[in-house]
Amino acid sequence: DIQMTQSPSTLSASLGDRVTITCRASQSISSWLAWYQQKVGKAPKLLIYEASNLESGVPSRFSGSGSGTEFTLTISSLQPDDFATYYCQQYKSLWTFGQGTKVEIK
Amino acid sequence: EVQLVESGGGLVQPGGSLRLSCSASGFTLSSYSMNWVRQAPGKGLEWVSYISGSSSTIYYADSVKGRFTISRDNAKNSLYLQMNSLRAEDTAVYYCARGSTVTYFEYWGQGTLVTVSS
C-alpha cells in the first residue's frame, strides 16, 4: 500500500502570505497526485491533478509541483476564502489520501 | 451541471446493515467510474470503494472488504453501497465521487452521515 504523509498538520498564516504544503509518498507515484480543498461541513473540491495541472475555475494563486515521492501545494497570496483543510491524494495504485493540512488564521 | 446526491444514511446498531444511494445527473453515468469515500467525525478522508463504468472492475479498501458491496444501475443513474456487519468505526460521512478518465475525483456529492451506535 502507498502511504501519503502531509506536513505540516496545521499551518497558521496571515492574509497575503505565501503558503506551502508538502506531501510525501512512501514510494514513487510519478505525477499521479491530486490536491483537494475542504471547508468545514462541505465536500472536498478538486484543485490540482497530475501534480501540477490546475482544475478549471480554480484561482491561479494555487499551484502544484513535484514528482516521484515529494510534492508541494503553494498558495501564492493567501485570501480569506483559502482558510480550509487541504488533502493530497495518490491515484497510482488505488487511492490514498494524506492526513490533511489545516490552514488557519494567524 | 454535474450533480451527485447521496441518501440512505442514518443511525444503525452495530452488526446492522444500511444501503446508501448516490443519484447522478448532468452527465452520462455509464461513461465514468465512481467511488465511495468516507470521513469519520473530525478525521481525514478515506477511500472506500471503486466501480468502473461497466461494473467490470471493483475494488475495496481492506477496512470494508467482505462487508461492503458497491454496485451501480446506469439506467437509473444511480450508484449504491450496501453496508453489512456495521461497526462503530464505520461511523462517518459517506461521499460518492466521480472519477476522471485518469481516476482522480472530479466531482463529489454533499455526503450522507452514517452513525453506528447502540
Image (tube, coloured by chain):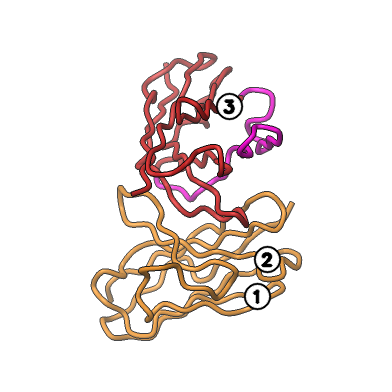
Chain colours: A orange, B red
Q: Is residue B90 magenta?
A: no
Question: Numbered disc 1: what chain?
Answer: A
Q: Secondary structure at mark 1?
A: strand
Task: Name the spot of residue A61 as percent of width and height, x first.
Answer: 37, 81
- Region rendered in magenta: B42-68
Circle 3 is placed at which residue position? B71
- What's the CA distance linking mark 2 and mark 1? 7 Å
Q: Can you say which quadrant of the picture contains the C terminus of chain B?
A: top left
Task: Name the spot of residue B73 as percent of width and height, x first.
Answer: 53, 25
The foreground one among B104 and B77 is B77
Residue type of the residue flagged with mark 3 = Ser
Tell me the residue at 44%/40% (across/down): B95
Task: Name the spot of residue B57 as percent of width and height, x first.
Answer: 70, 36
Q: Is the Cβ of the residue at disc 2 closer than 8 Å to that at disc 1?
A: yes
- What's the CA distance linking mark 2 and mark 3? 30 Å
Q: Quadrant of residue B30?
A: top right
Mark carried by residue A25: 2
Circle 1 is placed at which residue position? A70
